[in-house]
């Protein structure tokens, strides 16, 4: 068995490794495990990091499952926007679970080793999380476009049957890929990786440009409508779009950090800065999205009241039968 010191691990992407292996011949070299040297920078505060990330994971689970439970159990919320929000929360659980349990395990581990199969599995889950998240956000932008620009035709343009098809497509789209490349792994190769870069760029183009075009198209039309509308209509449109815009900005920040730390040399940054950039993508959207939509999008409902009624329908809010 061959073990490779891997500074640019999938659960804690920091700096590229100065190692020479040919990615296409990993099996021939006998590489079966990676040693994630980045975790060595955490050893002095292992218990602190473990408690922090464990707490964050619990918060993510509680927030997202509460939001999913509220939408599923409340029939009044079985509308296109809320069904998309429900899937956004489910994807947040999926993405954070791909990262945090394995990370907690390696924080407590002394060897910090991960098998090649586990490494590739995490590459796949992180990529599918990213594609599903972006596709859901694009679908939500279309929903906002129909609600604001074509309000009289909203239920005709966005029937639940169509929403279910969109959701199914959203989850199936990442699995159309025949392969999954991670640039952190590609950079370990000592062979020519030019074609891999081209394939990676084409892949990013195919799986992001349609969503980007849809988002700009829908918000372009929303902006055009708002320009010629009354101030009251502009205010309503702003309230309608604010949660989605905040979610988009949050996701865009995570994408920027992820691309920057994987594509550029950032060794001049501190360990803490690179750690923050690596973890933002899979931690902050799942934490902030439920808070954004729970407070501002669910028809200004009383969150605690409806959660209480969902789980205790036979009781009044004051506890009486």
Image: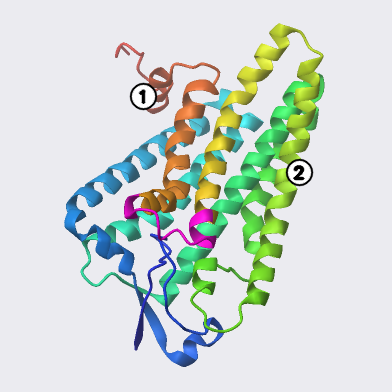
Report crowding for label 2: few under 14, some 14 to 19, many 20 or more residues within 10 A (C-alpha): few
Colour scheme of the rendered structure: rainbow
| Residue 216 vertical position relative to residue 77 in the rendered view, above or below | below
Identify the residue under disc 1.
312
What residue do we see at 65% from left, 46% from top? 135
Front one among 216 and 290: 216
Q: At x 34% / y 60%, what residue is drawn?
A: 102
Q: CA distance from mark 2 to mark 1?
A: 44 Å
Q: Residue at x 65, y 76 (%)?
A: 194
| Magenta region, residue range | 260-272
Indicate left or right for 84 with 104 as reference: right
Residue 65 in the image: above or below residue 102 = above
Residue 154 drawn at (x, y percent): 76, 25
**Does the segment drawn in magenta span residue 85?**
no
- The residue that mark 2 highlights is 213
Q: Secondary structure at mark 2?
A: helix
Specify whether 256 is left or right of 31.
Answer: right
Residue 247 in view in this figure: yes
Secondary structure under badge 1? Answer: loop
State which tag comes first along the sequence, 2 or 1: 2
Decide: is 107 above or below 152. Answer: below
Image quadrant for the C terminus? top left
Dot 1 crowding, Cα within 10 Å, few <14, some 14–19, many 20+: few
Q: Quadrant of the N terminus?
A: bottom left
Looking at this view, name the residue that lies furthest to the bottom.
Answer: 28
**Residue 253 x/y as whole percent:** 53, 42
Q: Is residue 261 magenta?
A: yes
Q: Is residue 118 above or below residue 47?
A: below
In the picture, measured across the screen, residue 293 lies left or right of residue 102, that is right
Q: Quadrant of residue 178?
A: bottom right
């Amino acid at each position: 068995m061959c073990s490779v010191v891997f500074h640019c691990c999938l659960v804690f992407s920091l700096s590229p490794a100065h190692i020479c292996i040919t990615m296409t011949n990993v099996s021939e070299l006998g590489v079966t495990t990676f040693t994630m040297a980045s975790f060595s920078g955490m050893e002095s505060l292992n218990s602190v990091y473990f408690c922090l990330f464990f707490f964050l994971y619990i918060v993510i689970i509680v927030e997202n499952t509460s939001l999913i439970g509220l939408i599923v159990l409340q029939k009044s919320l079985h509308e296109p926007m809320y069904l998309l929000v429900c899937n956004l929360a489910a994807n947040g659980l999926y993405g954070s679970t791909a990262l945090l349990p394995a990370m907690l395990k390696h924080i407590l581990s002394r060897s910090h080793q991960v098998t090649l199969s586990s490494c590739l599995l995490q590459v796949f889950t992180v990529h599918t999380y990213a594609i599903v998240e972006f596709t859901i956000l694009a679908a939500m932008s279309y929903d906002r476009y129909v609600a604001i620009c074509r309000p009289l035709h909203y239920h005709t343009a966005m029937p639940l049957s169509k929403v279910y098809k969109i959701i199914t497509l959203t989850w199936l789209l990442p699995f159309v890929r025949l392969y999954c490349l991670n640039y952190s792994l590609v950079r370990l190769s000592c062979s020519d990786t030019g074609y891999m870069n081209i394939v990676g760029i084409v892949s990013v183009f195919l799986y992001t440009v349609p969503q980007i075009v849809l988002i700009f198209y829908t918000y372009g039309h929303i902006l055009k409508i708002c320009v010629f509308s009354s101030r009251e209509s502009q205010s309503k449109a702003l309230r309608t779009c604010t949660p989605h815009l905040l979610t988009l900005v949050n996701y865009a920040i995570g994408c920027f950090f992820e691309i920057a730390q994987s594509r550029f040399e950032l060794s001049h940054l501190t360990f803490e800065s690179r750690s923050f950039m690596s973890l933002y993508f899979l931690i902050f959207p799942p934490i902030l999205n439920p808070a954004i939509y729970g407070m501002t999008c669910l028809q200004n409902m009383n969150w605690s009241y409806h959660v209480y009624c969902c789980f205790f329908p036979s009781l009044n809010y004051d506890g009486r039968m």
